Image (cartoon, helix red, strand yellow):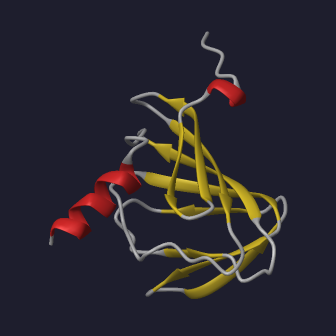
Amino acid sequence: MKVIRFSEAEQYEPQKDWKRVCLCGEKEISIEHFVKPPRHASPIHEHPNAQVLVVLKGRLAIVTEEEGELEVGEGDAVFIPGNQSHVVKNALAEPSIGLDIFVPGRSFDFWLKRNNAATKS
């Protein structure tokens, strides 16, 4: 067993006020707690890992080319298959909070690596 204390967990902000905390960073599964700031949208992206996004507070919209925009609220979950391009948006005027679960686990620094690669292009 491994206990991860929220206050001691690895964390960073991929963009201003978009906070991510690593609650589990294993090869088999990773779990990231996030705070998405008001009116924020992630860049369009994809990853080979399947993802389950759980909304803990607020509302989020997931946008894919195949399904368009789907809005989910507190307690709802969304399954995003691996390699499906998507955007996660918070249209509210207040932060929304959620969990991202990835199977298999992905590197916690996904957004830092992606931001660095975009900067070098």
Residue 118 horizontal side relative to residue 90, left or right: left
Q: Residue at x 34, y 64 (%)?
A: 83
Quadrant of the image containing the C terminus: bottom left
Residue 103 horizontal side relative to residue 3, left or right: left
Q: Residue at x 84, y 63 (%)?
A: 74
Residue 89: image x %, image y %?
62, 77
- For the view shown, which residue lies furthest in the left direction? 121
Q: Residue at x 50, y 37 (%)?
A: 30
Residue 17: image x %, image y %?
63, 62
Residue 118: image x %, image y %?
25, 69
Residue 59 horizontal side relative to residue 88, left or right: right
Quadrant of the image containing the N terminus: top right
Quarter of the image where one finds residue 9: top right
Residue 87: image x %, image y %?
50, 76
Q: Is residue 9 above or below residue 90?
A: above
Quarter of the image where one finds residue 5: top right
Q: How many marks?
A: 0
Q: Is residue 98 above or below residue 109?
A: below
